Image: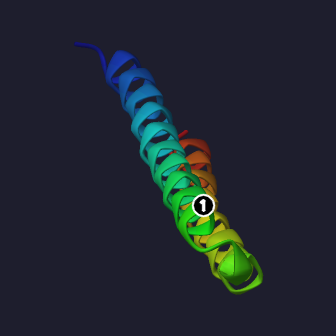
Amino acid sequence: MEPEAVLTLTKGLTMAIGGMMPALAIGLLGMKAMEAIGRNPEDAGKLFVPMLLGMAFAEAIAIYSLVVSFILT
């Protein structure tokens, strides 16, 4: 394989894996938070902020993969 093809493949895999895993994590966080709120509705206020923080940290990983793919030029 030519070096340009390897670089393009690496960028694509970085973005694909770096986008899939945080999306899965955000989905699981939302699912479990809604499940917890469904079981105990009065604790919705206590669950909301940690859920958003977890989603923000998972989304940061996706942004890091975007930055890595830009650096690989």
Q: In which quarter of the image is residue 41?
A: bottom right
Q: Left or right: where does residue 51 sit relative to residue 4?
A: right
Report the residue at 42% width, 46% height from top: 21
- Above or below, 49 relative to 67: below
Q: Residue 68: in sight, yes or no?
A: no
User: Callout 1 environment at 10 Å: few (<14), some (14 to 19), or many (20+)?
Assistant: few
- On-image quarter of the N terminus: top left
Pick the front one: 11 or 33: 33
- Above or below, 15 relative to 59: above
Q: Which amino acid does label 1 sit on?
A: Gly
Q: Left or right: where does residue 71 sit relative to residue 47?
A: left
Q: Residue 14: in sight, yes or no?
A: yes
Residue 52 at x, y percent in the picture: 70, 70
Residue 57 at x, y percent in the picture: 59, 70
- Above or below, 54 relative to 8: below
Report the residue at 72% width, 75% height from top: 48
Pick the front one: 54 or 5: 54
Residue 59 at x, y percent in the picture: 62, 58
Q: Quadrant of residue 73?
A: top right
Pick the front one: 6 or 16: 16
Pick the front one: 21 or 3: 21
Residue at the bottom extreme of this rendering: 46
Q: In terms of secondary structure, where does tag 1 sit?
A: helix
Q: Name the residue under label 1.
A: 38
- Above or below, 1 relative to 55: above
Q: How many marks?
A: 1
Residue at the left extreme of this rendering: 1
Residue 22 at x, y percent in the picture: 50, 50
Report the residue at 50% width, 36% height from top: 15
Q: What is the image's colouring?
A: rainbow
